[in-house]
C-alpha cells in the first residue's frame, strides 16, 4: 500500500507548543451539528430542547474540566449538554468491560483500534449506517471510504473510524558521516552494506579511534531491521511481543511472514551484516534508553525508529548537538531497494480508534449530528485549539498565553480525538513556521511516504487458537531469528524451523484466522502453507 500524502503530528505525541491552526471560516452565529446556522429562538418560546449526551473515552493524557469554556462553546453550537467520563488509558479496557457488562453504556463510546468488535457482538452498539447517510455529510466527507470499509463488522457499520497515520517509522542515517567519507545516500541493500562498512571501519567521526558501528538501534531491534524486511517485500510486525508475525495476501492465498522465503532471504542478508561485524553487538540486548544514549554520543551511524526519535529524543531531549556538534540525521529516502526493486516499511494500520453509539441511545439522530459537527472545519478547530481570539490567534501565530496555559494544564482539548480530520492536521503542520516543527516535518513526511506493508489480518479479531498458541509461537519466532542472524543456529536448519513453527501452533493459528477472515469479509482466501 502506497501513501504519499503529507502527514501531521498526532495529538498524543505532540510535545511542543501549537504554532499553527487551520484557517477556517467560523460563523459568527452558533452553528448546528450539521454545520448550518441555528435559527434564533423566538423569545425562547420555540427554542429546541437541549439534548443531553453522555460519552466515555480513554483520557489520552488529558483532563476533564467541568467549567471548560471550550466545552461550553461546543455545547452552545450543537445544542447539547455533555456528560463525559475520562478513564486513564491504562485502566480503560478493564473499567469499560465492567461498564459494558452492565449493559448500561453512555451514548458515545470511543475505544482503541478494533476493540469495538467484541462489544458489537454483545448487541451494545447501534448500526449507524442509515444515520450517517442521512445526518452525517461532514463525517462521510472527512473520512476516506477505505476507513469506513475497514471498520465494517459482519456487514454492518457500528463505528465511526478515527484515522491513524499508518507510517510511523523512519530509517535514519548520519548525513555528516556520509559527507565526511564522501559517500552518497544509499538507495539499495548493496550500497547500504558498503556504507555500514565505511561507518564501522573508516573512522567517520575522525577521532582516530575504532569506536563506531554502522548498524545500531535506539529502541528494539525489530524496528531497526524493518527496512531490510521491506526490501524483500515483507514486514514482520513486533517480533516476540506475544503475537505471531504478520501475514501477507498473494494470489488469493495468505502466507505467514515468519516461514516465508522472503523472510529467509532477509535473514541471510542480516547475517551477512552480522558476520561483517558492522552491527552493534548489543543490538539484541541493549535497553532503549541505553541505546538512545549510545546514538546521542555518536557511536552508531544508522537506526530505524519512530519518526520522533531523531529530531526530538536525540536532538532535543538528549542534546546530541552539544555532544556531537556536527551531527545531522537524515531519513533514508525514498528507501532501500532489495533484489527485486522492492522497498518499504511496516504499516501500523489506518485505524487509530473508533467511536460507537449505544444501541439504547434515545436520540441517535442528535448523536450523529453532534459528531458530524465535530467533523466540520469549525468543529475540528474548536475542539483542538479552543476559542479563536481567546486561546489562539491565526494559522501563522502561536497560542495566546491563555491558550498555552490551558494546553499545558491539559484541559483545553479533551474532545480532540473523537473525529479525525487528517487533511487539516497536514495543513496545520505544513503552515508551521516553528523551526522545531519544520524539522519534525522532514521525518513525519518521510514516514508517511514509504511503501507500507500491512498485515493481511489487520482488523481481524483474536481467535481462540491465537490466544492459546500465540505467545509460544511468537517467542519461538524471536528465538530463532536471533540465532539465525548471529549464527547460533545455521540456516541449513530452516526446514526444521518451519515444521517446528507449524507444530507449536503456527498452522492452527493461520487456519483459524483465515476462517474468521473469510466469514467477516465474505471472502474465499486459502492458506499458502
Image: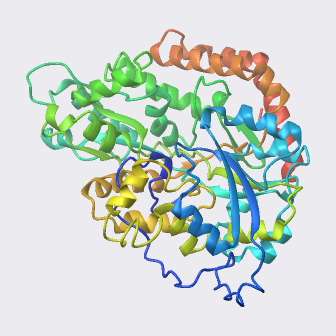
Location of residue 289 with respect to 312 vertically, above or below: above
- Between 15 and 2, which is closer to the camera in this rendering? 15
| Residue 510, horizontal then vertical, whole percent | 79, 32
Q: Quadrant of residue 86?
A: top right
Q: Which residue is drawn at 58% across and 45% down?
A: 348
Location of residue 456 with respect to 8 vertically, above or below: above
Tell whether 209 sits left or right of 423.
Answer: left
Q: Which colour scheme is used?
A: rainbow
Residue 18 visible to an observer of this rendering: no
| Residue 497, horizontal then vertical, whole percent | 66, 16
Q: Which residue is drawn at 35% across and 69% down?
A: 431
- Between 391 and 447, which is closer to the camera in this rendering? 391
Q: Which residue is drawn at 73% across and 72% down?
A: 369
Q: Quadrant of residue 143?
A: bottom right
Furthest toward the top, the residue is: 488
- Between 359 and 250, which is closer to the camera in this rendering? 359
Residue 24 visible to an observer of this rendering: yes
Location of residue 166 with respect to 377 vertically, above or below: above
Q: In which quarter of the image is residue 316?
A: top left
| Residue 492, horizontal then vertical, whole percent | 58, 15
Quarter holding the C terminus is: top right
Quarter holding the N terminus is: bottom right
| Residue 507, horizontal then vertical, whole percent | 79, 26
Tell whether 488 sits left or right of 246.
Answer: left
Q: Which residue is drawn at 44% across and 18% down?
A: 284
Amino acid at each position: 500500500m502506497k501513501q504519499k500524502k503529507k502527514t501531521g503530528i498526532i495529538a498524543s505525541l505532540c510535545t511542543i507548543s501549537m504554532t499553527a491552526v487551520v484557517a477556517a471560516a467560523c460563523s459568527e452565529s452558533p452553528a448546528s451539528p450539521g454545520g448550518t446556522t441555528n435559527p434564533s429562538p423566538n423569545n425562547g418560546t420555540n427554542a429546541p430542547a437541549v439534548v443531553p449526551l453522555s460519552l466515555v473515552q480513554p483520557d489520552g493524557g488529558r483532563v476533564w474540566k467541568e467549567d471548560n469554556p471550550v466545552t461550553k462553546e461546543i455545547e452552545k453550537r450543537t445544542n447539547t449538554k455533555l456528560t463525559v467520563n475520562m478513564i486513564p488509558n491504562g485502566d480503560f479496557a478493564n473499567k469499560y468491560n465492567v461498564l459494558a457488562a452492565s449493559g448500561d453504556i453512555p451514548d458515545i463510546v470511543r475505544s482503541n483500534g478494533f476493540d469495538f468488535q467484541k462489544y458489537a457482538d454483545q448487541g451494545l452498539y447501534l448500526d449507524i449506517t442509515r444515520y450517517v447517510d442521512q445526518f452525517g455529510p461532514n463525517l462521510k466527507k472527512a473520512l476516506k471510504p477505505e476507513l469506513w470499509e475497514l471498520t465494517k463488522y459482519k456487514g454492518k457499520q457500528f463505528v465511526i473510524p478515527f484515522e491513524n497515520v499508518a507510517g510511523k517509522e523512519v530509517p535514519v542515517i548520519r548525513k555528516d558521516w556520509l559527507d565526511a567519507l564522501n559517500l552518497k545516500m544509499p538507495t539499495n541493500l548493496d550500497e547500504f552494506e558498503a556504507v555500514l562498512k565505511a561507518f564501522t571501519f573508516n573512522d567517520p567521526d575522525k577521532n582516530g579511534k575504532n569506536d563506531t558501528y554502522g548498524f545500531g538501534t535506539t529502541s528494539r531491534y525489530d524496528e531497526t531491521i524493518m527496512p531490510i524486511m521491506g526490501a524483500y517485500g515483507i514486514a514482520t510486525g513486533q517480533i516476540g511481543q506475544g503475537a505471531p508475525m504478520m501475514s501477507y495476501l498473494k494470489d488469493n492465498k495468505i502466507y505467514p511472514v515468519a516461514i516465508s522465503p522472503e523472510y529467509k532471504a532477509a535473514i541471510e542478508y542480516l547475517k551477512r551484516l552480522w558476520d561483517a561485524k558492522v552491527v552493534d553487538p548489543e543490538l539484541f540486548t541493549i535497553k532503549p534508553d541505553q541505546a538512545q544514549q549510545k546514538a546521542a554520543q555518536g557511536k552508531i551511524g544508522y537506526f530505524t525508529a519512530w519518526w520522533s526519535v531523531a529530531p526530538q529524543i536525540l536532538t532535543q531531549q538528549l542534546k546530541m548537538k552539544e555532544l556531537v556538534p556536527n551531527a545531522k540525521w537524515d531519513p533514508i529516502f525514498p528507501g532501500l531497494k532489495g533484489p527485486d526493486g522492492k522497498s518499504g516499511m511496516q504499516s501500523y494500520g489506518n485505524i487509530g480508534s473508533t467511536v460507537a453509539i449505544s444501541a439504547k441511545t434515545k436520540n441517535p439522530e442528535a448523536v450523529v449530528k453532534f459528531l458530524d459537527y465535530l467533523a466540520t472545519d469549525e468543529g475540528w478547530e474548536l475542539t483542538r485549539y479552543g476559542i479563536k481570539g481567546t486561546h489562539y490567534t491565526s494559522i501563522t501565530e502561536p497560542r495566546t498565553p491563555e491558550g498555552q496555559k490551558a494546553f499545558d494544564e491539559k484541559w483545553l482539548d479533551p474532545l480532540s480525538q473523537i473525529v479525525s480530520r487528517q487533511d487539516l492536521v497536514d495543513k496545520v503542520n505544513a503552515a508551521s513556521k516553528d523551526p522545531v516543527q519544520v524539522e519534525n516535518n522532514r521525518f513525519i513526511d518521510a514516514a508517511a511516504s514509504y511503501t507500507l506493508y500491512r498485515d493481511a489480518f489487520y482488523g481481524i479479531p483474536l481467535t481462540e487458537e491465537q490466544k492459546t498458541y500465540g505467545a509460544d509461537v511468537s517467542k519461538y519466532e524471536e528465538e530463532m531469528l536471533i540465532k539465525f542472524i548471529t549464527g547460533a543456529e545455521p540456516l541449513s536448519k530452516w526446514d526444521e524451523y518451519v515444521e517446528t513453527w507449524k507444530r507449536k501452533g503456527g498452522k492452527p493459528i493461520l487456519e483459524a484466522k483465515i476462517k474468521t477472515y473469510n466469514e467477516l469479509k465474505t471472502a474465499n482466501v486459502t492458506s499458502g502453507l
